Image: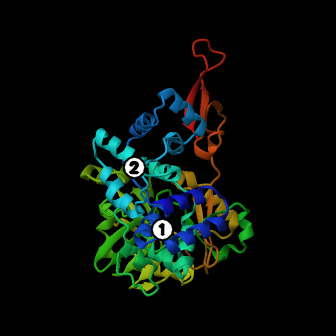
Amino acid sequence: MKAFAHLFAELDATTSTKAKTDALEAYFRSAPHADAAWALYVLAGGKPRQTVPTGLIRSTAREMAGVPEWLFDESYDVVGDLAETVAHILPPPTAAVDVPLHVWMQERLIALRGQPPGTLAVALRGYWNELDTAGRFLLTKLIGGGFRVGVARNLVVRALAQAAGLDAKVLAQRMMGYTDKQHTPSAAAFAALIDPGHVATTSGQPYPFFLAHPLQAPVESLGDRADWLVEWKWDGIRAQFIRRGGEAWLWSRGEDLLNGRFPEIDGAHGRLPDHTVLDGEIVVWRDGRVMPFAQLQQRIGRKNVTKKILADLPVAFLAYDLLELNGEDQRALPMWQRRERLEATVPADDTSPLKVSPRVDAADWPALAEQRGESRARGVEGFMLKHRDGRYGTGRTKDVGLWWKWKVDPYTIDAVLIYAQSGHGRRANLYTDYTFAVWDGDATDPANPRRLVPFAKA
């Protein structure tokens, strides 16, 4: 735990990419596999669930420190971060114990879930009494559900790849699904992850997603219009749909396994050849068109999908790339060839929830810009532009191909700033959260005087 707390402090104290990479690489080279497995999980985006209510953390820390509530609140307002406030006000520890990180995660923190307040308070006092300031800060972040660290996932992958002597792209592929909520980090899984000769046996593992760049230059700067494949940019959930060995998996870009959330898509895998992987978008699809994302949100959090939900909010998977076919990786093929194979692989059937995202044809850029003006009426965000010779890369890279997001310009609104709230942590001395309002009423009508109506916080 001490080693990981030290790493967390190092990462939090610098904005240098090199310094962060060096710190991560040094940790992964020295940490036992069981600890490194959990460190990788949380650093790469795994989200530890809150195990202790915030109110109980505050009250237990106040009692242990012997400070009144008003003084704790004043300290919190100045510091701006609950975990940092707790770490500073607690009395010095009396126990010198260095429990490994994996023991903390597996045997201590997970065991706190569902315990009564009295049991939680006793455990907290004991745990805080074993840790120094850095350890207390980290522990409070983990139990409070507020763990965040200023490192990108690809930086963590690169550092681990350097420590293990692996190609970063190979490691990125192996790590797909590592931060899924159903995955429990272990020494064995970590050892397999960094083993140069390891052959993956998880048939449902997705590929790393290829990400697009926002187009900020004039579209004409991209050159010949004929060099680009154009599709609508859907406002849904980016996902990979996998069929291998007669089974199906649906993975979100955030590496959440969505099986069971969208049973109509799950049940359509039989329409695909075995050992096929599609990249695409999950949307609510009704009467031949996409519905607003707000309707999809009504499906996202539901574990129990009723017949009424299936009827009212039917979903479709709009496939726009083919990553695997008959067990062969297609990502090194040019985009135009993957597109042709995709259209030949996904059956054309209006009744199926599996559909190929339609291409948009236009003679030149001005004609395409005119069609882009239809985006809002179609319920889409604009266009995706994909170079016809581009390969399918890993992450937001430009080394093998290019995808551009050519989105419609956002609406603007005249608003009144009515409230500003100070930030937390490093932003504690800055106003970072603003509440806006718009005027309602008629200034010239005494019966309907103008008033400010709050509408957004940003």
| Mark 2 neighbour density, 10 Å: few (under 14) some (14–19) many (20 or more) | some
Question: Is any part of residue 291 visible from this angle?
Answer: yes
Vertical placement of 95 versus 228: above or below? above
Question: Which residue: 71% across, 70% down?
Answer: 222
Task: Tell me the mark number nearer the camera, choosing from 1 and 2.
Answer: 2
| Mark 1 neighbour density, 10 Å: few (under 14) some (14–19) many (20 or more) | some
Question: Which residue: 46% across, 32% down?
Answer: 66
| Most foreground residue, 276 or 381 | 276
Vertical placement of 335 versus 404: above or below? below
Q: Tag 2, which secondary structure? A: helix
Q: Position of residue 59 (x, y in %)?
A: 41, 35
The quadrant where residue 444 appears: top right
Specify the label residue 452 is tagged with: none
Location of mark 1 (residue): 357
| 40 on left or right of 314 | right
Q: Amino acid at mark 2?
A: Tyr
Q: Amino acid at mark 1?
A: Ser
| Most foreground residue, 369 or 421 | 421
Q: Tag 1, which secondary structure? A: loop
N-term-proximal mark, 1 vs 2: 2
Q: Position of residue 44 (x, y in %)?
A: 49, 64
Location of mark 2 (residue): 127
